Amino acid sequence: MSPETKLTAQETKEAVLWVAKEMLRTNLVEGTAGNLGARLPDGNAVLTPSSVDYTEMTLDDLVVTDLDGNVLEGERGPTTEKALHLSALRLHDDINATMHCHARFATMFALTRQSIPAVIEEFVVFVGGDVEVADYKTTGTDELADEVAKRAAARRDSPHSRRGQRDVRRLLPFRPHREVLSLRPRSRPGTAR
């Protein structure tokens, strides 16, 4: 576990649920598309479930797995992209949360196989430079997970060709500074809007 992880397991689950709902509210996903994962204080992961409407999702719907994907807690199956999330968490101790969404502009770059250029100073400061497009791999496969985790070593964000955006964060709650690639939360989980 990264020394930056300061949330309890309950707070992490609440943050994951909040961000899942924010993904839908801010149009980063539609329907049940997209998914999230986060490292828990004990080293396991909490993942969003597969095919559950974000408007109806509750804390009880979230799934806890070990980093090998074995379900430890939850009634539902984890996201079909569990390998993607778990690979990033397993290979990078400093990554504490992962997001797969379909942000409109990141998806456009991925579809055209163009890197997202760092054209303003803030982008360089908060993202670290240009964001490469990952090679296309089939959804839900270990090959996709390995490709994205490999890209995360050099950059913490990597749009995946023809699939949309993989936004990897160091910790929850998500930082609002990553304007092109991130949610812009108005409040933290558990606080008034």
Image (cartoon, rainbow, N blue to C red):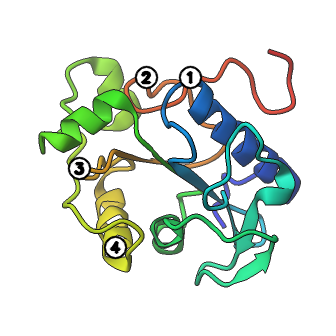
Q: Residue at x 86, y 24 (%)?
A: 191
Q: CA distance from mark 1 to mark 4?
A: 28 Å
Instruction: Give the amino acid type for the residue marked by disc 3 in the picture.
Output: Arg
Q: Is residue 191 above or below residue 79?
A: above
Instruction: Give the amino acid type for the residue marked by disc 4 in the picture.
Output: Asp
Q: Is residue 21 left or right of residue 131?
A: right
- Quarter of the image holding residue 102? top left
Instruction: Give the amino acid type for the residue marked by disc 2 in the picture.
Output: Glu
- Quarter of the image holding residue 45? bottom right
First-in-chain label (3 vs 2): 3
Q: Which residue is mark 3?
A: 162
Q: Position of residue 118 (x, y in %)?
A: 22, 28
Q: Which residue is mark 2?
A: 179
Q: Residue at x 74, y 21 (%)?
A: 187
Q: CA distance from mark 2 to mark 4?
A: 26 Å
Of residue 99 and residue 61, the one placed in the foreground of this image is 61
First-in-chain label (2 vs 4): 4
Q: Is residue 112 left or right of residue 179?
A: left
Judging from the image, what secondary structure is the residue with disc 4 in? helix
Q: Is residue 49 above or below residue 189?
A: below
In this view, the mark in front (4 or 3):
3
Tell me the crowding category of disc 2: few under 14, some 14 to 19, or many 20 or more residues within 10 angstroms, Cα based.
few
Q: Is residue 42 above or below residue 47?
A: below
Q: Is residue 110 left or right of residue 45?
A: left
Q: Which residue is mark 4?
A: 146
In this view, the mark in front (3 or 2):
3
Q: Which mark is residue 184?
A: 1
